[in-house]
Amino acid sequence: MSSKVYYLNDRAGSMMDSIPFKGVKVLKDAGLAGMIKPGDRVAIKTHMGEWGNALNLRPHWVSAVADEVKRLGGKPAIVETCVAAYGESVSRISREDHLRVAAAHGFTEETMGCPIIICDGDYGTEDVKVEVPNGVYLKYAYLAKKLLDFDVVIVVSHFKGHAMGVFGGAMKNVGIGMASARGKYAIHNITHPEIGIKTWQINQDAVKKHAQAPSPNLIERMVDNCPCEAFAYDGETLTRDSEKCRQCGFCFAYLFQGVYNFPPELVPSWPAGITDAACGFIHAIGKEKMIFLNYAMDITPGCDCGNFHDKALTPNLGVFASRDPVAVDMACIEAAEAVTAVPGSAASEYGFGEPNTERFTNCSSMAKLSQWAQLNAAVYNGMGDTEYVLVNSVTEFTEAFNFPPYTMAEPYTHVHKEIYKEINMDPGDYAYGKLPRLAMEEQSKKPKGKLKEISIAEDK
Ligand code: SF4
């Protein structure tokens, strides 16, 4: 059975074509109004971006959805979870810090017009164990507890690449984004009894190299930052006492600096694990309560959990909404595959600029896993369908999109109208004449530009 995906592109010619209003429109077409009863508590699950990343979803793309929930009589709340403490530059480990980063990115109760709730407690520990029906890899997953408190859940996701999931969309926003800290670690196999972090061998050659760097070098930081004092360095060799290690995950990111030799079995399960967790969470919350909106904009190779972002792989595509998280992600990835890559992007640079070149497989995945893996796993575990009907939505003007309380009947509002009666708009003798003194022909010539290009070293 196929699912329907409602779509609008990112072209615009008037206010009703604005991206946040298009997001609202495709949600309406996908059936949002029929899901919300007056007084319902409505969660809007989104990702407010890691510190340093600037291409997470814009705050007003999310607040537009909260406004629509209020118009339908619901009580919205923006919901998120703590990030797993996987490295020294991670900013959203605690509820308190997560809210500080969110505020820096423009997400506050004031800008959203509703509460922002971190659903797994102060440190990502408040969760419930849920079964994954027919998982490809996972038997259980750990869901942030407060997510079970809502009548309706709207999943608002940024579609882009992802180092571990290969791409990130609705399924990743649920599978990882709704998991508690231990849930996130389990999906990434950091706490797996046979291949998890406790079993990883230390690469002493990499230790020697890093130990030569100025203090505080990476090895010194590794020793100092372990909360369980599990590491010891004698000036030659770094050792770890596995008995002391509580698998907090903090030293996971040192893997990327070559300090660990990790087992090859660690990575192939990542996409399926994300999808399995999403399946378990949707099963626990109730699929009938959920709807999915993907903003396929700023389609970067990496995810919003990174503290940087590369140039987008593809041009902006638009907005997609569905009741099926699998179909909405499939529609986005097919749309991304159908276009030529952005010039100068990683896709163009590495030879995946032409359409249908699996550019997420080749530019996003840190282990060159397939961009189809999440989707095939989702069909296997029964979460949804990759076959879909793409419905080209039509934008509509609604007075509700006006900045409140402005209306068509009272465009300035009463107060402004009274003031405008008195305002003096006379600018005096402000111009040289009726036409510019530089003729349009002269204004239209390309001016002189770059003389030469030099390095910073040459810039004396
Ligand atoms: S407790 Fe274990 S996982 Fe956490 S930093 Fe120490 S060695 Fe690494």
Image (spheres, rainbow, N blue to C red):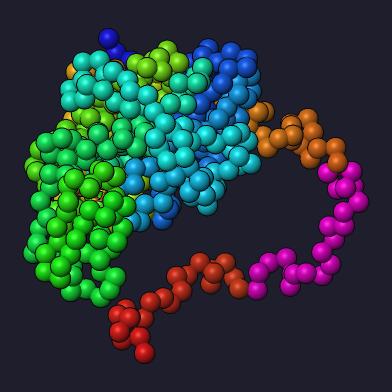
- The quadrant in which residue 358 appears is top left
- The quadrant in which residue 207 appears is bottom left
Q: Position of residue 178 (x, y in %)?
A: 38, 31
Identify the main secondary structure in magenta: loop
Give the residue furthest to the front.
243
Q: Is 173 placed above or below 308 here? A: above
Is 242 colored magenta in this rendering? Answer: no
Q: Position of residue 147 (x, y in %)?
A: 45, 25
In this view of the protein, which residue sits in the foreground, 455 or 149? Answer: 149
In this view of the protein, which residue sits in the foreground, 257 or 355? Answer: 257
Q: Is 216 placed above or below 152 here? A: below
Q: Position of residue 377 (x, y in %)?
A: 20, 24
Say left or right for 303 vs 106.
Answer: left
- Residue 447 in view: yes
- Residue 334 in view: no
| Residue at image point 15% right, 71% down | 235
Q: Which residues are magenta?
A: 416-437
| Residue at image point 41% right, 51% down | 91
| Residue at image point 23% right, 47% down | 245
In this view of the protein, which residue sits in the foreground, 255 or 400? Answer: 255
Q: Position of residue 216 (x, y in %)?
A: 29, 70
| Residue at image point 21% right, 73% down | 213
Which quarter of the rendering shows the N terminus? top left
